Image: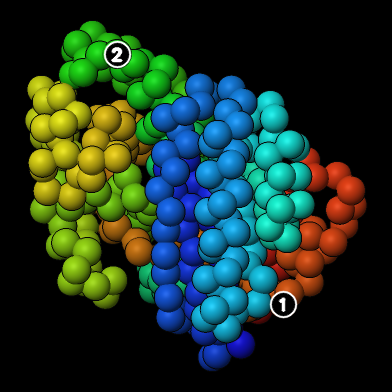
Amino acid sequence: MRISVVDVGSNTVRLVVADAEGGVPLPVHTAKWRLRLSEEVEPGGPLPEAAVERLVEAVAEASRTAAKWGASAPLAFATAVVRGAPNRAEVLHAVRSRTGVGLCTLPGELEAELTFLGARRWMGWRAGPLALLDIGGGSLEVAFGRGRVPDFVASLPLGAARLTHEFFEGQDPPPSELVRELRRRVRHQLRDVAARIRWEGPRTAVVTSRTFQQLGRLCGAAPGRRGPFVERRLRRSDLREAIALLIELPAAERALLPGISAPRAAQSLAGAVVGHTALKLTGIKTVTVCPWAIREGVLLRHIEDGASWWEAIDHADEEKPDRELVPLRIAAAGS
């Protein structure tokens, strides 16, 4: 069986085509379309018409690419940049009517749940009680669990693109007082979630997302060209030193640093502040940078629980294009 998933994020539309034999999604083709939607949308603001047009074109091309590789219709979802847009219904309707792809929006809590599933499968049972952090463009997802299903999840409005726009707009590089103000915001919003993580005492902590991958590379982790099976670790102390470096540089110069891509250079400082503050508040000193995240979680859920979990959403109430993909708890049986 060959399946595919399309992930509409704040910066890119990503396609993964995978073979699902043996219960493990083995990628056979990946592609991405860089749209940089977060640069055109204020937090909570509508997607402009030109951005919607580019999104439709990207999803259409992703669908054609998946078909060319022999995959069924893609499981397509959008995260915070579309989820929080007041014209979300119009955006989803435009994609469906013009591409035939049933794009859904993922609630943040479900993002965390599916990302946890991907990380758990990658890390294995020997990881024990597992804590997860994922910094997206619009939100920060946090999860903790001892099994296949997280015991609790949280989604907070602490995405790297969102905070960059809110705190650092027009400030390149930003003054130190704005960085301190950002850190205070992150501490305030993370306080209760971090206390729960400390109380649970995870045996293993993992981070996912492009933001953490790039910060890991900046702090000395192996480059992506060495493949997904190389262990990559990120230490809190190294991340603190990275912040001291990033705060001194404008975005153009940050893009010259190891791991920091030009499209994400402007938001790298906010991402580093969120990541370091989260690790400090939770008492976590070292994390593993996990290559599996939400896309793999969607594929695994499809493989392990069958097509009905997605079809029930895709076929239900199709006349309401603004429907949200509501959390459907992963069955604990057999975990």
Q: Quadrant of residue 311?
A: bottom right
Query: Which quarter of the rendering shows the N terminus?
Result: bottom right
- Residue under label 1: 306
Q: Is residue 239 above or below residue 144?
A: above
**Near-viewer residue (236 or 58):** 58
Instruction: Pick whichever, 128 or 118, lies toward us.
Output: 118
Q: CA distance from mark 2 to mark 1?
A: 48 Å
Q: Is residue 55 above or below residue 167?
A: below
The x and y percentages for residue 187 are: 38, 23
Q: Quadrant of the C terminus?
A: bottom right
Q: x and y percent of residue 305 in the render?
A: 70, 75
Q: Nearer the viewer, mark 2 or mark 1?
A: 2
Number of marks drawn? 2
Q: Nearer the viewer, residue 260 or 22?
A: 260
Q: In the rendered structure, are the residues bearing label 2 and label 1 in contact, judged by CB atoms less than 8 Å apart?
A: no
Q: Residue at x 47, y 28 (%)?
A: 40
Which residue is label 2 attached to?
A: 170
Q: Quadrant of residue 205?
A: bottom left
Q: At 11% across and 53% down in the image, what residue appears?
A: 220
Asked if residue 123 shows in the view, the reply is yes
- The amino acid on which the numbered mark 2 sits, given as a three-letter code, is Gly
Q: Residue at x 58, y 69 (%)?
A: 64
Q: Nearer the viewer, residue 173 or 56?
A: 56
Classify 10 Å Cα crowding around label 1: few (below 14), some (14-19), many (20 and above).
Answer: few
Q: Residues within 10 Å of mark 2 (few under 14, many from 20)?
A: few
Q: Position of residue 50 (x, y in %)?
A: 55, 34
Q: Is residue 159 visible?
A: no
Numbered disc 2: secondary structure = loop
Q: Is residue 140 left or right of residue 326?
A: left
| Residue 318 in picture, x, y percent from top left | 86, 53
